[in-house]
Amino acid sequence: MDPGEMPDELKEMSVVEQQLICRLSPAIHVHMLGHVGIAANGHCVTFPQNVNEPAKILPKLPTDIDVLRVTRKGKNNTSKDFRCRRHKIQNALEWLKQHNPAYSDIIISEANLSVLPADGELIVNCLNVDSENISEHSDKGPAPLQTCVNETDAGVSDSCVLLNDPPVNIQEEISNTIQSLTGDEEENLETVINHKKKEARIPWPTRANEPISEFTTRIFFTLSFPTLFPRQQGDFHINRPRTCTSLSDWADHLMWYKDGRFAKHQYFKFIVHNMIMRKRALELSSFIVKQKLGEEHFSIDEIREKIRGGDTTIVDKLLYFSASLRGTSQYWNQRSKELRALVQYQINEGNGLPSFFTTGSCAEYHFKPLRNLLQNYIGLTTGESPDLSDRSVMFKVLQQHTHVIAQYFDLRTQAYFKEVMKPVFGVNAFWYRREFAKSRGMIHWHGLCWRSDKEPHVLLSDAMCAGMNPEDRANKLSGWAKAELGMTASHPAGKNVEGEPRKEFWPPPEGTAQVPPEDKNPLIKLLMDVSQSQESLLEDHLLLTNRINIHRCSDYCLCLPRNSRHGEKVCRMEFGSEKHPGKAVRDELSIVLDRNRNERLEMSRDHPFLVQHSKYHTQGWRANGDISIILSKNGPDNPSVDEIIATENYITGYACKGNEGTSALNDLFNDTINSSENSTVKSVCTSLLMNAVKRDVSSTEAAFELSSIPLYRSSHQFQSVSITGARMLERNGFTLTKQSPLDKYLQRPQGDTSSFYQFISKSGKVPVPSGGPIYATWPLIEDYSRTMLLLHWPNWRKVSDIVGECDKYSWVDVLHNFLVTDQCPNFLKADIERARLRITNDQAEENTVESAETRGEDQPEWMDLIAPDGLVGSDIEANEIDFDDGGPCYDWTKTSEAYPDNANTFIDSVTKETCEEATLDIPDVDLGNLNPEQKFAYKIVWKI
C-alpha cells in the first residue's frame, strides 16, 4: 500500500492552497492567530463536517473555502498558512487532472484563477478581536522552564473537535442479531469469520448518498487530500493489504510513511481520528441477555422454535450497549472503578494501600534521546538535517512529528517503570495513565505504586505499636524516605559555614544564580552523562532542581477556596496565596494534615518555593515529576477505614478525571465575545461553538489514538464480575449466551469455600464488580446490600445460603450483621463508613470529590457487564460502556453536526435565522443546575 511519491507541483502547499484545489472539504478550520499559547504564535481548531457533492470547477473561490480567521489586534497576525500563489494552484490542478483519475474530469477555471493573488496572503473571512478586552492567563504549568515558553514564528499548534456518535436503530439491530444467531450454520459462516470470538456485533451501517459517506466513498481521501494521495493510490478502499485490516492500522501505516507528509499534514490525523472514534462507537457495541440469577442458558434450538412459532419475547430480554470510547469521560469513569478495585484487591491480598503517588511529564524540547531520534528519523525520511537547537525549528518539528513523540514517551515510560521504579523504588505493582494537558509538555503520566516491602506502612505501624510520639515517628519516616526514595525539601546547594543557605546557587528572585549555558542544561543530559563522580551528581541535582523543582504560582495552580466566589486565590499546591506566596522555612520535620485532611510528611526546608521531591526520581526521569508518600498507620494487613477513604478520594477526584482540552475552545469563545464587530463571521464562530459540545483533541492525543498506544498501563489485569443472571449474547455451542464468571463460581468444586470475590482473585485478576450499585449510600439500601453480600459472602451457592429460607428477609439487615464479622473486608467497611460520613459530617462531605456519575447510583444493574474487545495492550481488559442518553432534548437522528460544505452557505443561513428569530422565549430554569456544557452555551448566548 504505497500512496506514491509527491510531485513537485503538490509540495509545500499552504492550508488555503490545499483548500482551493481539493474536491471535498471534510472540515471547517478556525485559525486563531496571535493566540496566547506556549511556543506557538497561533492555534487552529478543526471542526469536522459532512460533505456533499464533489466540486468539479476548480480552483474554488476564496469565499468558498472552509477557513475562518480570528485575529487579535496588537498581535502578530501573519501566517504562512494563508499564503496563496496563483501559479502554484494552476500547476497543481493541471498535474492532478493529468495524473489523478479522481481529478480527470475537473474543469480548471481561468476566471477563478484570476481572482487569486499572484503571491500573497489570501483574504478569507476574518473576525478581529480587541486584545485589550481579553484577560491574559499565566498558565505556565508546574515546570515552565522545561518548555519553550517564548513565542516563535514557527507556525500554529492544532486541535480538533469531536463529532457526536452516529445513531443506531436498536430495535432493528436486535431483531437482525437474533435472526443471525439462531440461523443455520451455513448461513452464519460469514458472520463467524468476520466476528472475532463469535460475539454478536452490530454491522457498520451505510449512510445515504447525501451527504457523502467517508466510510463508503471509494476515493473519499483522494478527493479530500489530493496532496497526500496524488495518484489515487493508497486510499483506504483501494488496494489495501490484509495487514491493514482497520482504519486505525491504515492510518498508523501512513503516519510513518517515508516522506512524513501524512504526519506533517495539519488536519489529516484529526479527520481520521474522528472517523475512527465514531466507527468504534458502533463496532465495539454489544448485546446482553437479561436473565435472573440461577436461570439456565438459552438453548438455540428452543429460541429457534419460539421465533418460528411467532414468539419474539426474546427481543424484550435483550439490551444494547454502546462502548465508551477511549479518552472520553465515560472511559475514565470505568478506569476509576478498575483502579478502585485494584486498591481493594491489594488490601485483600495483604499488600495494603499504595506506597506513593507519582508523576512524570514530557520535556520534549530537551530529552536527548528524543532529539537524536527525531534527527535520525527526519534524516532517513527526508534527507534533511534540521537545526534542533533553534527553538522555532524544534517547535515545528515537534508539531509535525507527534506520532514519534507519542511512541517515544510510551517506550520511555515503560522502560522507566521496569528499569528504575522496580529496582530502585522497590515497586512490584502499579497503575498509571497518560494525560494530555496544556502547560506540562505534550504528555504526562501519573499513577499509584505499591512497594514489595509494603513500606512505609510497616514502618509506621511498628512505630505506632511501639508507642512512639509524633515527633519520633516523623523522624523515623523521614530517615526512611531519605534513604529509600531520596526525598528532600531542602535545596541541594546546602548551607555555608555560618549555617546560612547558599543563595548564590539559587535561581532569582530568591537567589542570584544565573541560567547556565545550553551545554550545561541538565534536561538535555542523560544520567550516565553526569554520574562520573559524587560532585557531578550533586551539580546535576542542583541544576535540575533550579530548572524543574522550584514552584512558581500561576493560573495553573491559583484558585479560589472551596465555596468561595471572591477573595484571595490560594495555591492548590499549598505554596501560599497571591498576597502571601511560599511555604514557611522550617528546620524541624513533622507529619501534617494537607488541605484534604490527609496526613503528609513535611520535611525540613530552607527554600520557600522548593518542591519536596525525590532526587532519585528527579535525576532518573529528568523532567518535571513528583513522588508523594501515602501514609498508613495501621499496617498493610489492616488499613483503617479513614485511610482507605482518603486513597479512594484521590482516585475519584484526580487519577481518573477526563482529559482536558487544549483551552482553544475557551479562547475562541473569549475572542468571539470580546470582538467589537457584529459580523457574520462572529455568527459562524458562535454557531460552531454552540455545536462543539465535546472538548477538542490535541495533535499528540490524536497521534496516540492512531498509533493505538494504551492510555493507561497496569501491573494487573482486570476481570469484570456481574452478580446478576445477565449474560453476554454469543453463539456458544448449543446455547445462545456466554458462560459468565458467576456461572463458573456457582459450579466450583465442593471443597472451595471462598467468596465470589476471592474466587476471582485466585486467578490473579482484579475483580471489578458490576451488576448493581457498587458505591454505598446512607442509609443502606437493599440493592447495594444484595450486591455486596453476593460478592463477599463466603461459600454460597444459592441465595438462601445468605438470607435463609424465610420468605421475608432484608438484605440490609444481613449486611449490617456481616459488617461486624472478621469475614467482611475492610474496604467494604470503608465504603459504607464514607457514605455515613457524607451525611453526618459536613467537612467529610466537602472533601469527598464524587459525582452522581462517578458513584453510578442511577445506573442499571447490568450497566458494566460488557467488556467488548479492547483496542490494544492493557486497554483490552477494559469494561467500556457508555450510558449517556444525551438528555431529553438530544436529537439522536443526527449523524454529525450539520456544517455546510462551505462557509458562505453557513453565513447566509445563520444570518437568515438571526433575522427571522426576533424573539426568544426563555424557560424557567435553575441556572445552578446547569452542567458545564450548558453553562458554556448559556454564556455564549447571553454575552453575544
Image (tube, rainbow, N blue to C red):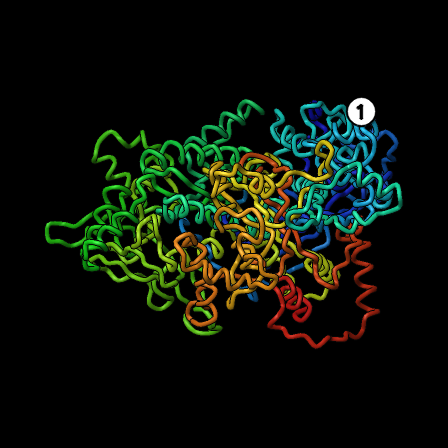
- In percent of the image, x 64 and y 28: which residue is there? 253
Q: Is residue 269 above or below residue 167?
A: above
Residue 869: x and y, percent?
63, 37
Relative image position of residue 343 (x, y in whole percent): 44, 48
116 vs 816, nearest the viewer: 816
Residue lying furthest bottom: 924
Residue 673: x and y, percent?
64, 65
Residue 581 can be seen in this image:
yes
Residue 276 rendering spot, x and y as whole percentages: 68, 40
> Residue at 88% across / 31% down in the picture?
105
State the quadrant of the C terminus: bottom right
Give the class, few, some or many, for how many residues have Cα within 10 Å of label 1's Cα (few <14, many ≥20). Answer: some
Residue drawn at 73 percent across, 25 percent down = 240
In-image side of 894 versus 761 (left or right) = right
Which image quadrant: the N terminus?
top right
Residue at 54% across, 57% down: 803
Residue identifier under label 1 = 99
Picture quadrant of residue 677: bottom right
Which residue is nearer to you in this view: 238 or 39? 238
Determine if residue 21 is in view: no
Q: Amino acid at mark 1?
A: His
Please tell me which residue lies in front, 820 or 406: 820
Q: Quadrant of residue 614?
A: top left
Horizontal side, residue 18 vs residue 581: left or right: right
Residue at disc 1, secondary structure: helix
